Amino acid sequence: MFPITAATTGVLALAMVNSWARKATHHESSEDLRRRLDLSPRLWRTVGFMELLAAIGLAVGLVVAPLGVAAAAGVAAVMVGAITLHLRVDIAGTALVAPFVVLGIAVAAGDLRLLTM
């Protein structure tokens, strides 16, 4: 079961690195979303940095299981926050697909890491 855990965790880590990179490089769509969510540039960069740390935690967590579980839980919490912010500013529909998918992957990765401790 560990190969499935590693693959799921790897996909989640890549999603976090992608999100961080889009924030760090001020990608146009990322900046548009930041403005729609009414978040400051500083908070947006902080969220991106936390996503990068989550990706590192997920990778190291494949060796140190409690860290992997904690990192996956952290990603899940961030996604719940993202979904909440989207709904707060009336962003719904297909725009919510990505955060819900990442939330599902985070829950699966955390659960799988718990099972493979």
Image (cartoon, rainbow, N blue to C red):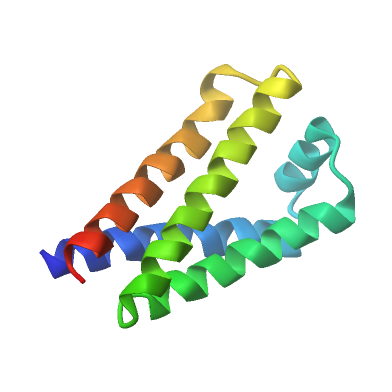
Quadrant (top left/top right/bottom left/bottom right) for the C terminus: bottom left
Residue 21 in sight here: no
Q: Residue furthest left?
A: 1
For residue 104, above or below residue 66: above
For residue 47, above or below residue 3: above
Question: Residue 25, image x and y in percent?
Answer: 75, 63
- The residue that appears at 78% across and 60% down in the rendered structure is 45
- Identify which residue, 77 or 83, lies in the foreground: 77
Question: Residue 56, image x and y in percent?
Answer: 50, 75
- Identify which residue, 3 or 71, lies in the foreground: 71
- Identify which residue, 55 or 68, lies in the foreground: 68
Residue 108 in sight here: yes
Q: How many numbered marks have been drawn onto this rendered protein structure?
A: 0
Residue 60 placement: quadrant = bottom left
Question: Residue 1, image x and y in percent?
Answer: 10, 64
- The residue that appears at 44% across and 44% down in the rendered structure is 102
Question: Residue 106, image x and y in percent?
Answer: 39, 50
Residue 32 placement: quadrant = top right
- The residue that appears at 46% across and 34% down in the rendered structure is 100
- The residue that appears at 31% across and 82% down in the rendered structure is 63
For residue 93, above or below residue 82: above
Residue 72 placement: quadrant = bottom left
For residue 84, above or below residue 33: above
